Image: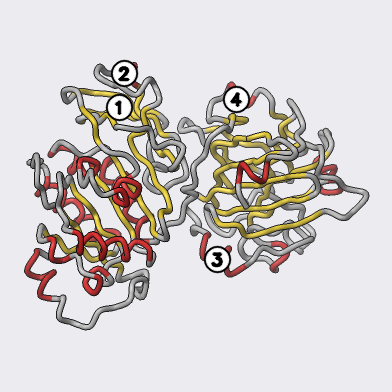
Amino acid sequence: MHTTGRWTTAVAGAALLLGCVSQPAASHGSHGSDDKRVLVFSKTAGFRHDSIPEGIAAVRDLGASDGFTVAATEDAAAFTARNLRRYDAVVFLSTTGDVLDSGQQRAFEGYIRNGGGYVGIHAAADTEYDWAFYGGLAGAWFQSHPAIQPATVVSEDRAHPSTSSLSPAWNRTDEWYNYRSNPRERVRVLASLDESSYTGGTMNGDHPIAWCQTYQGGRSFYTGLGHTKESYTDPVFRRHLAGGIRYAIGDAQADCRPENGYRPLFDGTAASLDGWRQAGPGAFTLSADGTLTSTGGMGMLWYAASGFSSYSLKLDWRVAGDDNSGVFVGFPPSDDPWSAVDNGYEIQIDATDVPEKTTGSVYGFRSADLKKRDRALNPPGEWNTYEIRVEGERLRVWLNGVKINDFTNTDPARSLTDGHIGLQNHGADDQVSFRDVRIRELPAQAARASQGD
């Protein structure tokens, strides 16, 4: 909502690298957004992919276009604490076998624990099988693969920068890895394989192929794609890889906590809108890529099929510019949008209003932690993820995996213990988009223990 009275709410090669070691080391994270540094490491002690030169060239191209500096090496002597501090992320590009000695491993562990970034591409999962830290960082180890063939990649996370530009189903040809374990319980799965679309999958129909996580203080992104030379000239794969690197170096924010047990309320299909109703003027339009975008207003699209009491609600949202919207929770069923204003609470989407009425605030009641909010927030044009968790009269908000608000209702005229949810369409000048509204209903007693604080 705006204070104007309008109703608003949320609906360089190895020589270059090693030659620099003698220079004063910069602390990790000291680089500005315009001088991030990435090290591509492609040493192999087993099978060697002939696509490695193309991969290095592709990362260099991405650095030139996305504003980060790239150095490449196959010399493990680069893995010293002093040298690694110079980089915001290290890309393991189809490394294989045991590529680091124990001292180099310790240096890399310290780098990650001090906030460094890791990007694993394809055979990075076929690396360092006896190093438990690396296995956890990569997420899973390689087990086998069938012949190179076409398959369907399913985008599970439509907000992460590595997958936000992908179609819900992506048909491509690659070498499809099977993994020794399923990482889903430990990582945020970004994309998976439809095992019915090809032959040779061995993961019983649940086949993650790209994922992210925060790991012992650092950021990790892994993609199983990238076996073929052609991958690195494919613009779609390049966008996928660029998004993963941007996440790892901290230029893009994302919720990379594991996500399990949610069911969709809106999954991008027209059929999933059957339980929703428009209250008040305006509307939402559904695009072919499964995005809902607000038009006109002041109104609200609300989920009329059922109310909720104890739950975790997640949704992805994006603003085009200085736009206004919000997410309403805890209001009684009504086709009058003012009922949500008067009886529920709004989690605001609008980064330019006063603190208690900006993105992440409980509108008019409690400001978000603005320092945390600002660090977690992606700019207009990029996707963000809210988690809104309601337990009793307590309401907490996470933005891209960072908790930014904790509010408890004490107003006897309002209650969060039972109510509906809604997405605001604020007005003709406000265009806000939503994807993948999903919910996990929580047991009254066990909810906090199962989700963490």
Residue 225, quarter of picture = top left
Q: CA distance from mark 4 to mark 2?
A: 24 Å
Q: Amino acid at mark 4?
A: Ser
Of badges 4 and 2, nearer the viewer stands 2
**Residue that badge 1 annotates:** 171
For the question of whether residue 425 can be seen, the reply is no
332 up-or-down from 376: above or below: above
Farthest right residue in view: 412
Which three-letter amino acid code belongs to the residue tagged 2?
Answer: Ser
| Amino acid, disc 3 | Asp
CB atoms at circles 1 and 3 under 8 Å apart?
A: no
What separation in Å lies between label 1 and label 4 (alpha carbons)? 24 Å
Question: Disc 2 or 1, which lies upstream in sequence?
Answer: 1
Residue at 17 percent across and 45 percent down: it is 94
| Coordinates of residue 124 in the picture (x, y in percent) | 22, 45
Residue at 71% over, 35% down: 443
Work out whether mark 3 precedes mark 2 in sequence or the reverse, and give the earlier one. 2
| Residue assigned mark 2 | 197
**Residue at image mark 3:** 374
The residue positioned 7% from the left and 41% from the top of the image is 50
Q: Residue at x 65, y 48 (%)?
A: 428
Name which quarter of the figure residue 151 lies in.
Answer: top left
Do labels 2 and 1 touch, CB within 8 Å? yes
Q: Amino acid at mark 1?
A: Asn
- Say whether disc 1 or disc 3 marks the residue closer to the N-terminus: 1
Q: What is the distance, in whole Å, between disc 2 and disc 1 at their CAs?
A: 9 Å
Mark 4 highlights which residue? 272
Q: Secondary structure at mark 1?
A: strand
